[in-house]
Image (spheres, rainbow, N blue to C red):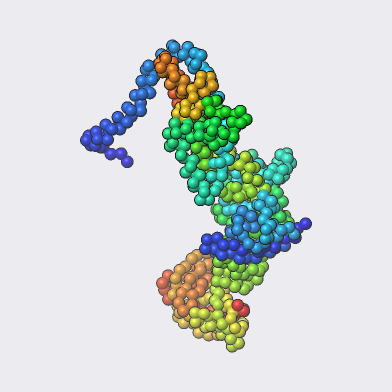
Amino acid sequence: MRVGLDARIRLTRGTLDLDVALAAGPGEVVGVLGPNGGGKTTAVLALAGVLAGSDGWVRVDGATWHEGRVRRAPDRRHVGLMLADPLLFPNLPAVENVAYGLRSRGVRRPAARRRALAELERVGLGPQAEARPRELSSGQAARVALARALATDPALLLLDEPLSALDPETRARTRSDLAARLAAYDGVTVLVTHDPLDALTLADRLVFIENGRVTQAGTPGEVLRQPRSPYVATVVGLNLYAATGDSQGHARTDSGSVLVTTDPTEGPVWVAFSPSAVSLHRREPEGSPRNTWALRISDVTLHGQTARVGLTGPIDLTAEVTMESISALGLRVGQQVWAAVKATEVRTYPR
Amino acid sequence: MRYAAGLRSRLTLGVPAGLALLLLVVPLAALLTRADWSRLPGDLATPTVLPALRLSLLTTSTTAGLCLLLGTPLAWFLARSEHRVTRWVRALLTVPLVLPPVVGGVALLMAWGRTGLLGQHLAPFGVQIPFTTVAVVLAETFVAMPFFVLAVEGAMRGLDPRLEAVARTLGATDVHYLRTVALPLVLPGLASGLALAWARALGEFGATLTFAGSFPGRTQTAPLAVYAALEQDPQVAISVSIVLLAVSVLVLGVLRGRWLR
């Protein structure tokens, strides 16, 4: 019976001191995000049981895979593992790669083959069944790896950056294949990614791991609204500051800037506003209660019709403006501009 | 990039280089020029030569089989272990490579001889190893196994360890993974290791003579037969040498063509 995942992983490897809790119900996809070296992959490998020396526990569907002296070997856990590198067995054709898990578990060749072919067809690779891994494109190889991981009906599916090795176009197609396939899967999926799009489109819940600790966990909606670490803010694209708020609508950041808000919270707070709430001006703007700063442009990057402008000064922030205003204002890197944010756009919430 | 070398530097390097080549090629050429091709079939059919060739074929094949059966698992452990002890084991393995074969023969006598470390426990059962065909195989295995293990270990180290992690999550045990993925992938290394070991076993002389003696039909392998024939009928020695040379070149050719870069 499907119950889900309940895990606490504690281990030390090199400079990494990892202590994270992961939980999910059946059919749920948990997106694990975080900077490189923060422990995402280590956590996944510990769940798979291929890393020794982990403390804590791993319980899946009511069975204890790891706790105290119980240490199930990877082949006795019921996981599917897929990494950025598809790692197909190069000596076996696609269908035998997919059938490998079933054959290892003693399923007879014809039955294993039938199931493997069905899995390949689910990811649109029926015609490539007999192809050797080196004859497959990167996107096809990734789909074979997914089919192989799912062919054994694992209780826990571990996907570590499954799309990161693909070119953008292939990635988009493979992402939708993955979404469709995961929708039909009733076990728990743990999806490690550094791509916010993967996380927001595929995951039901997000867990951020930084420096071996969970810095934030929640639904994508919660995380988008109230990021709770600078890294999370970068991922969801918000300007975020740790500050101390008062009841008058002022929040003083740890670096000393004071922001005005119509949404006051007292005590230690997070202050957040969207880059699109920032307007840029050649001269100091006047009018309704707003925050204004004279800042220097540190970088400009283009995203389609909009531009993200990095600004530094008394406060560092990112502004999102249209291409038109870039040219109308004649913005250049190194130039000084006035940045303004309306008090109504500034949100605060307790830290 | 190539550039024109002065005559002087060409001479200072060219002369020793040419000498080195001569030292290697002249003996082989001499062997071929002294061969009496019409006598070759007759020489090989003599009552001492034929059994020696047959014995060599038997013992070297058995040695190769032992290497494959026992050396492969050893290479597997060595390739996967990062333990400090592994480094010592690997160093130990290279000893038979550089050891004078006669010393190897003496060491084998000390182990398997009637009063030897292991032999003394076998003697009460009437089992005597030295100066038997089994001794020939043991001597050949002693010198050939390191070649095989080191070649196969090198190939296994080239495998991506993540392949094994994936196989393990798919329910594969060590042995299943080894059989279905690792061995097929290291097949070239396995083949070249096998050929190296086999060629080394075929040429084994010193350890065999010391530990097994040179009894025709029982322990006199082809190289020992060549040495014995040299005193009685040098032409027979030349003919058998030609055969061994041909076999060596053949092994090398097969390796070059298929597996060696």
**Residue A343 versus residue A167 in the image, above or below:** below
Horizontally, residue A155 falls left or right of residue B37, namely: right
Q: Residue A185, image x and y in percent?
A: 72, 55
Horizontally, residue A137 falls left or right of residue B255, namely: right
Q: Residue B25, image x and y in percent?
A: 35, 26
**Image quarter of the N terminus of chain B:** top left
What's the residue at 45%, 36% (across, down)? B97
Residue ranking furthest to the left = B8
| Residue A2, visible in the rendered structure | yes
**Residue A348 versus residue A91 in the image, above or below:** below
**Image quarter of the C terminus of chain B:** top left
Res A3 → quadrant: bottom right
Horizontally, residue B95 falls left or right of residue A103, namely: left
Which of the pair A262/B122 is nearer the observer? B122
| Residue B203, visible in the rendered structure | no
Q: Residue A6, image x and y in percent?
A: 70, 63
Which of the pair A172/B144 is nearer the observer? B144
Which of the pair B25/A39 is nearer the observer? B25
